[in-house]
Amino acid sequence: MRRRIRALAAAFFALPLSLAVAPSAHAADPTTMTSGFYVDPNSSAKQWFAANPGDGRAPAINASIATTPMARWFGAWSGTIGTATGAYVGAADHSDKLPVLVAYNIYLRDSCGGHSGGGAASPSAYATWIAQFAGGIANRPAVVILEPDSLADYGCLNQAQIRERQGMISGALSEFNRQAPNTWVYLDAGNPGWISAATMAQRLHEAGLRQAHGFSLNISNYYTTAQNTAYGNAVNSELAARYDYTKPFVVDTSRNGNGSNGEWCNAGGRRIGTPTQMGGGAEMLLWIKAPGESDGNCGVGAGSTAGQFLPEVAYKMIHGY
């Protein structure tokens, strides 16, 4: 009830939006329907802490990482996807908190990087999966980050596959608009060191950005918030000049406290960044990649697999060394 009261109050007192900003597909604002961000009780850091309470690193990892709101990633490992997303947003809704979910199952996922390769078996399989993902959320408030790297990672796709991917993403956005009216969906736009702002604006638009609430930046990377804000503004300048609209954006700050050293895969010497919050130069600063989770068999995570929690990496990231 209290989130509905907040939503009504926000709608009543809201000022008109700038005409330069393309309106969201939904009228509802999930941030006004909840009382803060949801802390995943089963995050990898939380699970490690529960299993290792006597470890000398445990208090710092619990205090600085495990209790910070961050995204939960969903893919083939999630089981029946509608049940999985439904259970997660249902638990958050019961606590009156806003969950952040990542949809990470696009056909030919990570086709260039390879460490997180996989995804749905076909475009049609993806369409079914993402429709069930959205259906599980239904009318409960949520934030969804849609398919990290999917638009930046075109280098190993041919033109037919690129068009196929654009269709999958556009179809996914349509499903969220149809089935999840209180969800803000952010279409991923890579990071400042990957694709030019002009090219990314074109890719976002061609994949259906008008249907999304906004776009996301810096997922699983290390660029500073200032660098991402400058890049996001540049993308919006291109969108405005070429397509006559702009969109809000969010930045992954989970590992950008020391900025980037030019490496992307388990870079050493990095540091956790600003905890999840509204504002901060973007619409939201979010912990999307969980600190301490490996990017794959590389860098300071040599010998690990993508997604594996590495307590020593997490501990060093808290202190920045």
Image: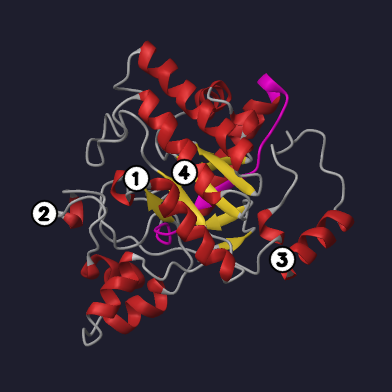
Q: Position of residue 120 (x, y in %)?
A: 32, 33
Q: Nearer the viewer, residue 228 or 186?
A: 186
* Residue, disc 3: 3
Would you say residue 190 is visible in this rendering? Answer: no
* Residue, disc 1: 75
Q: Say whether residue 249 is magenta.
A: yes
Q: Residue at 40% of width from left, 75% of height from top?
A: 64
Would you say residue 249 is visible in this rendering? Answer: yes
Q: Nearer the viewer, residue 112 or 178?
A: 178
Q: Say whether residue 229 is magenta.
A: no
Residue depth check, mark 4 versus mark 1: number of the one nearer the observer: 4
Q: Relative to 237, does residue 145 appear above or below in the rendering?
A: below
Looking at the image, tell me whether mark 4 or mark 3 is earlier in sequence order. Answer: 3
Looking at the image, tell me whether mark 3 or mark 2 is earlier in sequence order. Answer: 3
Q: Are marks 3 and 1 in contact (CB under 8 Å)?
A: no
Mark 2 surroundings: few (<14), some (14-19) or many (≥20) residues within 10 A: few
Q: Position of residue 222 (x, y in %)?
A: 39, 51
Looking at the image, tell me whether mark 4 or mark 2 is earlier in sequence order. Answer: 4
Q: Are marks 4 and 1 in contact (CB under 8 Å)?
A: no
How far is the residue under mark 3 from the one under mark 2? 45 Å
* Residue, disc 2: 303
* Residue, disc 4: 133
- Range of magenta residues: 241-258
Q: Position of residue 12 (x, y in %)?
A: 88, 56
Q: Amino acid at mark 3?
A: Arg
Q: Relative to 224, does residue 216 appear above or below in the rendering?
A: above
Q: Amino acid at mark 4?
A: Phe
